[in-house]
Image (tube, rainbow, N blue to C red):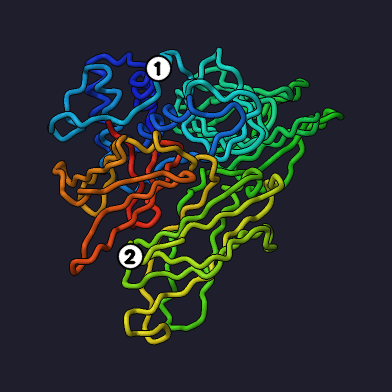
Amino acid sequence: MKPSVELINLTSKSLSKSLSRVEMARLEELLENDSNLDYYLQLTAVEANLPHLSSNEVAPFQKQPRKVKLWPRYAAAAVLLFGTGLITGKLLFNESPTPAVALNDHPSTSNAKASITSLIGVTWNGAAPESIDLTDDSRPITIDSGLVEITFQSGVRALVEGPASFKVTGGNEAYMDKGRVVADVPDGAEGFTINYTEGKVIDLGTEFALHIPGDHRPVEVGVFRGEVEVHAKNGHTPMKVLENHAIKYGGPNGEHFSSIPFDRTEFIRELPSREFPWTLPETPTTELSELVFDVSHLVWKAGDYQAIVKWMHGRDALVIQHAELRKNGVTITQDNHMGMTGLISRSENNTYKFHIDERPNRNDTWTLHLLVIADNRGDDKIGHFSPDSTGTLLFEDTQSLMSDAEAFAGTWEYRHNEDIHRRTFHADRTATYSINGRQTPDFNGASWEVTDGILTLTIPRKINGKQANIIEKHQLRDGKELIFLNQPYRNGYRVE
């Protein structure tokens, strides 16, 4: 569900700490809706991420899956409300205040016309923005590759694909020098306009695509639904472009409007997920099965990538024999080690790493291939039972995953089944654990260390009088999400 104009405006005011008490109460009412709360947290998460970006690159960032209801969402939603001193407590179910997620120290500006709401695989051309909020005075968003989602004050969502230069010039308009953009215009935001050297596109209630290739080549406009009005700089009569139609015009010869086939595959309409579900085929067999994942929209640049294979449910552990990354069907890089994912006692070496030497072409198809098989089920050997194993594959650029011990220190919260869990990594390298607000002795004597960006947690256990420690492993995504490498839990979020 798209955010309403009211929610966008109240969220912007919340980020700038300029909400009145009446507006605060209204925002709390809106955030009781899961979709509205997801939108709010997407903005706060991006706001928190931007100050830590390097001057050239940012690792992929993406919205949290909408179907997963995690307790930290409520804590994060409360953080800025507490900051204003106006929260009434409804967001926390009338319980005592919950410590909030750490956010950006730089406050948002109250005159923002739009906000950056998501980033995927971006390589900046120049410095990254200092804030998610964009005003008339903000410098253009200029990227060499990747995707930037911008949500306007009017509710319009523009998904910009690099290489591109895109500048917000108002609450319902922008200027674009080059690049591809898909604009989704909700009811009430008709008239959304993108200006460019060759003219402008005015929305009439639609979802449309615009490609400005630069180098004086013709501009292309296509309409997924609804209609737009295209104005040429040379004074030609404006042309209406209808649903499923496309035109091109301009270029070195000043071409008039001409109809062209609308190739929808040339434009990205939705942000891609970094998580992929998998299910092992249920047919009894002793042969390896191949699991294939299309990761094309996550491979934007040369560099290092990582796949984590996580078991989530089922009787059987999954044995991974081989993993490889292919471009257009040809193997480019592979990781041949054997791994396993299942219950923690049966999860090991389930992370696979890949390196891409050359910058990918946007039209390349990248697929990840895993050769897998169920593990023996006790005395039952494979081929004599129907495998029962499902899970999730996490795939991403590894830049965001390298963290030191200081970054891991603190409290992390996650939800599993119906329980709220917290684990705290203390500066003295001990750890504590609580469930539903009550600390348990489960982590008594536990210790942790960080090597090459991976936290290893050692939890002492004795079985039949013998030491049998539990080893858990974690990584951090963008310094904000705790990833469980060998446990079937969703990501945790930092709390204070």
Are the two marked residues, 2 and 1, in contact with CB atoms closer than 8 angstroms? no
- Work out whether residue 227 can be spotted: no
Q: Which residue in the protein does label 2 denote?
A: 345
Q: Residue at x 70, y 62 (%)?
A: 330
Spot occupied by residue 282 in the image (x, y as percentages of width and height): 41, 77
The residue lying toward the viewer, choosing from 427 and 479, is 427
- Vertical position of residue 351 compared to residue 257: above or below: below
Q: Mark 1 highlights which residue?
A: 107
**Residue 338, horizontal then vertical, whole percent:** 51, 68
Separation of residues labelled 2 and 1 (CA atoms):
45 Å
Closest to the observer: 224 or 138? 138
- In which quadrant is the N terminus drawn? top left
- Give residue 313's position: percent from left, percent from top: 32, 64
What type is the residue that disc 2 sits on? Ser
Identity, as a three-letter code, of the amino acid under mark 1: Pro
Residue 266, given in percent of the width and then of the height, sits at: 66, 46
Callout 2: few (<14), some (14-19), or many (20+) C-alpha neighbours within 10 Å?
A: few
Q: Image check: 321 left or right of 106?
A: right
- Compare marks 2 and 1 and give the one earlier in the sequence: 1
Give above or below for 281 relative to 202.
Answer: below
